[in-house]
Amino acid sequence: MTDASANVATAGALPARRSTRWLARTREARFAALLLVPSVIVVFGIVIYPVLRTLYTSFYAVNSPFPGNYPGVGFHNYTAALSNPGFWSAVERTAYFTFVSTALELLFGIGIALLLYAPLRMRWLFRTIVVLPWALPTIVNGALWRYMFDANYGVINAAFTQLHLIGSYKAWLSSPFGALNIVILADVWKNTSLVAFFLLAGLATIPRELYEAARIDGVTPFQAFMRITLPLLRPAIVVVLVLRTIEAFKVFDIIYVMTGGGPANGTQSVSFYTYQRAFSDEYFGYGSALAYLIVLFILVLAALYIRALRSDNYGIG
Amino acid sequence: MREDDERPITRRDFLGTAAAGTAAFYLAACGSGSSSSSSSGKSAGTVTLNNLFQQQAGYSASDIAGMTAEFEKANSNIKVNNTLVAYEALHDKIVAAAPAGTYDVVLGDCIWPAEFGSKNIVKDLTSLVQGLPVNEIFPGAIQMALYKGKYYGMPWILDTKYMYANTAMLKKAGKTTADLKTLTGMVSTLEALKSKGVLKYPFMGSWKQAEAVVCDYATLVGAFGGKFLDSAGKPVFNTGGGVQALEFMKMLLDKGLANPSSTSSAEEEVLKAFAAEQVAVNWNWTFQLAGATEPSKSKVPAGDVAIMHTPQGTPGVTPPGVNGGQPLMITTGSSHPNEAWEYIKFITSKQAQNNYVKDSLPIWAPSYDEPAVIKTAGAQLVSVAKTQLPDMILRPQVPNYNAASQELQVQIQKALLGKTSAKSALDTAAKAFSAGAPV
Amino acid sequence: MAESRRYRIFIHAAAIVVSLVFLLPFAWLLIASLASPVDLLRVPLKWVPSHLSFSRYESIFSSTGDTIFANFRAALINSLIVASATVAISLTIGVFGAYAFARLKFRLARASLLLFLSTYMIPPIALVIPMYLIMVKLHLLDSRLGLIIVYCSFATPFVLWIMGNYFQTIPRELEDAARVDGCTRIGALFRVILPLARPGLLSTALFAFLIAWDEFLYALIFTSTNAAKTIPVAIAEFTGRYTTDFGLQATGGILAALPPVLIAVVFQRYIVGGLSAGAVKG
């Protein structure tokens, strides 16, 4: 797409074409900088010191919150983390959590987005209901699901036994893998609505004429979905995927509230592992290194996504 | 169906939003001015203390407010601001605030003096504490802030695990509370309850992978005459009494005497089970007494709830209970340590504690003979407490307690689930206690 | 015709299933908030407890003094203020920056966006202690303003990324048409792009609102009193050392969910605005 503005700017200019484009470019660049200044101030103003300080801390063996003279250890904290099986178990669990929850949220999210867009009766009521899980604070959401799956009094046990789906009350949250899946369930229940609303906004930008034209051509709804909706929704899907992945990798609050990392570290996400090492154990140097390793992992993941689902965005890759 | 119209967002709309945002911003900013209560007072000579307490444990918020009001009346130059937070947040807030010196007095847990003392987060109060009538404080209580011979805090909240029993159920099995005096007696009582069909699983432990399981384990270590650390501070719980304790827990599960959900239950679940008449015998903190006798919370008639000393491992030898106390500490960053100590002295005094006995028992032995105390706290509780509190087993005071305890919890669970033997589980855990930072 | 009818039945059935999945846990929450603790312990469970009482709601609305109930009321207000301000500020700032990423060509566009996004990738736990020290130095500890600033710092990259992408999906011709008519870039932003981007704007606003509404760790560490305590912190205080009254947490949860739901209901009409035929052919 040609940039009309550049042409407008160069109309009537005297020097050779190359330098006028350069002039326009710099003007654009300066304008862009101006537009970005508030963002830079707000984001980096408050964050730059902590970011740098934590990075700095990661190169020392710091074991108390006080500033002081600690021995420098170079990359030792990083190598210790990378060679620690506890760390990799946490990474594995987080990867599983991320993959499963994001996939489910996307799957259900698209479905619900389509429903939100569809001509339902009492559409406002449906939309309100879909918003409900999102509105519930995570801290209550975690308590809710933990209570529902309680081994002795939970409603899930009550319902399933009364419906004869299981014979007797089960201790759902007692197995490490079971607990992890239930945390995923709680997370998906809450976040799918968000994904749905976000994709709804994406759906809304798809021109209806495309669907009308397709219908005239005799295309089935399913084919319309696969050939029109999905491809045009791809930018929105990429964004949602990247953001949910980042969130899932950082997952902390729901684990803090629901399981505290257990049982047997079964729900210890990599962020929770970092919290335990940095705060509970007060290994701040090690914890700082862990944090930056997490950022690295997320960056790589995000880059992979964007490359794999290459949309023609300005984006990263 | 036409959706909403697309009138352009005019500059006015935008300015309106920006104005609203700015208004909210200022609203918030105004709020911040009043809250920045720094530690220096208004008038000359007035000192303000900022303290960190815990919400809903031991003393209630109104109890603390009451004690504080009396303190301020007696000390007109000191003003006190107390912040109450959930227990889980306590450790993190103390650590985060340490470099900034935000708080003067903080309420800690008996498992933190080693960590906080060695990292210089709280002050050494040895000389101050020893200036008090220490011999009137329960020996078990005074230990809760001790690390390497120094006192890093002053005991304030005192708690230990007692044994609770549903006497109606015991009766159905032909047993009484006297049968629960020893561990062997307890086991035969449980077996009777089971074989007579009173309950499928008469006992329940709080053996979840959390500090809860370490507390139950500690109770048994004490009963079997074991120790966590030797005099040199090296872990020895993987020998003798420590191993017997874990094997005992496993035995209860294997024989079907302990409810299988014990391994995913904390103290709260055990109380709920007792209150729902699903458990006949268990160990728990003081709070179970109130929770099990209140009609809106429990199906058990109040008269059927018995509270007693934890069972003896060796008949005739009174075992120590697990120390679950919480000491008050002074941060090293505090700018008013003297005033902070005055406050601590006041609220830990006999007088202050005797006035609020309903929520937490005093640290002073003589108080337990005061008629007013006995009346308010309940005769049954006071008489048992008098015997249980003097001797308490402290969980190991090591600077890396949190990390080591985590490992111990995991290993105990592994042993209980049959994945490893008790001895090897404890051997692995013992290594964690002597370990340092992650290598 | 028949197909359309089958279609309608299908979507309504699907909507009902989805609604049930979302509503049932809420129904349980409601029941728990009205039931006494002993009722919830019954096995087998009675689905509607025999005694329902509004005492928890009453406590929250009428309790005075330094109680966890009064704290909750204060927290509700704090959360509303903090979340609204965060949305207003981060959206305003972010929209300008997003325009730059979407429409302007400049070197380091990719790198700077990546830089913004990478701050969003840092787990909050990593920055807590240095951030705490800053808050102390700026006297922002235990203040709503402090929380707003911190939340804006991680909501803004988010807005930049999402709105940037969203703007990209809006055809340039519309803007170009406006600018040919003499509009400036910013004018075109307001008159052409933003109205069309309204669905995206509102979704982003909802997202940003949730970030602030739900945030737990920083609120926990940086706030102490009712001056700034937010809802997650207040609800966390409903838990005692060894006991939880789940009914109380449920009560708090329901009350805390009301404001966001109301906001979403009010704005949900705006989220779906389609491109009308006129705008495209324009």
Image (tube, coloured by chain):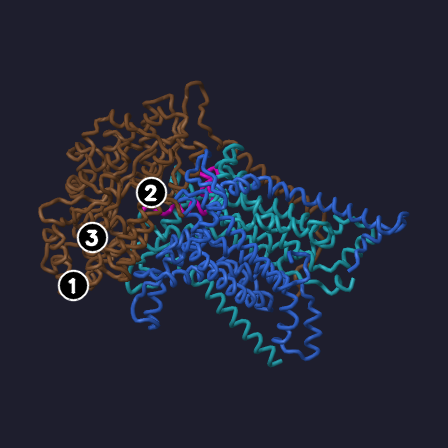
Mark 1 secondary-structure assignment: helix
Q: Are marks 1 and 2 on the same chain?
A: yes
Residue labelled with disc 3: B245
Evaluate if marks 1 and 2 touch, with contact meaning CB atoms under 8 Å apart: no
Q: Residues within 10 Å of mark 1 (few under 14, many from 20)?
A: some
Relative image position of residue B14 (x, y in whole percent): 68, 46
Q: Compared with residue B335, is residue A272 higher up or lower down, i.e. above or below?
A: below
Q: Which residues are magenta?
A: C220-241
Residue labelled with disc 2: B56
Q: Chain of mark 3?
A: B
Most distant residue in the top direction: B44
Relative depth, front residue between A301 and A185: A301
Residue at screen point 35% across, 30% down: B123
Relative image position of residue A31 (x, y in whole percent): 74, 45
Relative image position of residue C235 (x, y in whole percent): 41, 47
Residue labelled with disc 1: B194
Answer with the quarter of the image where residue B144 lies. top left
Who's brown, chain-wise?
A: B
Amino acid type, label 1: Lys
Mark 2 secondary-structure assignment: loop
Q: Earlier in the sequence, mark 1 or mark 2?
A: 2
Answer with the quarter of the image where residue B85 lies. top left
Evaluate if marks 3 and 2 touch, with contact meaning CB atoms under 8 Å apart: no
Q: Is residue A76 left or right of residue A262?
A: right
Relative depth, front residue between B19 and C106: C106
Colour representing chain A: blue
Q: Compared with residue B62, is residue C44 higher up or lower down, i.e. above or below?
A: below
Q: Chain of mark 2?
A: B
